[in-house]
Amino acid sequence: MDYLILVNSFEPLSEDFEKTLCLTKTHGKLFEKQTAKALDKMLGDALSDGLKIEVISGHRTAEYQQMLWEKEISKLMGRGLGYKAAVKEVGKTLALPRCSEHETGLAADLAQEGQDDVSESFAKTPQSVWLEKNAHRYGFILRYPRLKEHITGIAFEPWHYRYVGAESAVMIKRNGICLEEFLDFYQDKYLDSTKSEV
Ligand SMILES: [Zn+2]
């Protein structure tokens, strides 16, 4: 598994990606094996600090992502938006099939205790503050931060955490960058000093 895999509207997953995935169920959702382990540890430690965090979403199949996409488009078109306008609007917070990180099993949508859906208000909760402070230690990054929308192409999502492994997550957090920036500017430098690949 490439924990630094980039998945966005320009970099869709290959058709056979799903066959290579090894998924584990935790908190009622499926995640890539190592991601599930790290998520368990992170949520357990948050709970020890008195903060219960709900897992809203884990792995999704491309078919499920397609269904979500179509549902949102028809909802907006039902409100009178044209197809193109609806696609633009939905695209701000929902990825196209094969373009969602959820299909990798490396992404988790999280919420505060008692919630059954994601919400922008999560950003103001102690759970979100805890995650912003600690998630990198477990290998997770806030994947779509504020002020990086022009690079990620996705609006601020306080609920969406992505597993990249602890070393990379620490670098990303310390430098205040997003995954795209890390892959473009830091990865080579970083990997040169940590990998002995010939
Ligand atoms: Zn998400």
Image: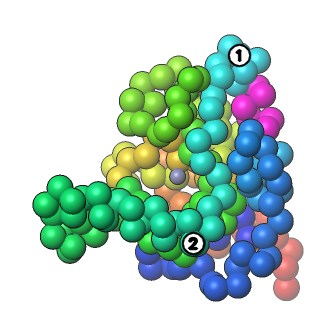
Q: Is residue 42 magenta?
A: yes
Q: Main secondary structure of the magenta part?
A: helix
Q: Position of residue 117 (x, y in %)?
A: 49, 38
At mark 2, the secondary structure is helix
| Residue type for callout 2 | Glu
At mark 1, the secondary structure is loop
**First along the sequence among labels 2 and 1:** 1
Instruction: Provide the residue span drawn in magenta.
Output: 40-45
Question: What residue is drawn where x is 56% and y is 23%?
Answer: 114
Q: Position of residue 185 (x, y in %)?
A: 53, 68
- Labels in figure, total: 2
- The one nearer the camera, 48 or 187, is 48
Q: Is residue 177 magenta?
A: no
Location of the N terminus by quadrant is bottom right
Q: Is mark 2 within 8 Å of ligand 1?
A: no
- The one nearer the camera, 71 or 107, is 71
- The one nearer the camera, 113 or 151, is 113
Q: Which residue is mark 2?
A: 63
Question: What residue is drawn where x is 38% and y is 56%?
Answer: 93
Q: Is mark 1 within 8 Å of ligand 1?
A: no
Q: Position of residue 77 (x, y in %)?
A: 21, 64
Q: Would you call the spot at circle 2 few (<14 residues within 10 Å), some (14-19), or many (20 or more)?
A: few
Marks 2 and 1 sit apart, C-alpha to C-alpha, by 38 Å
Q: Which quadrant of the figure has residue 20?
A: bottom right
Q: Is residue 16 visible?
A: yes
Tell me how the rendering is colored.
rainbow
| Residue type for callout 1 | Asp
Q: Which residue is mark 1?
A: 49
Question: What residue is drawn where x is 74% and y is 53%?
Answer: 30
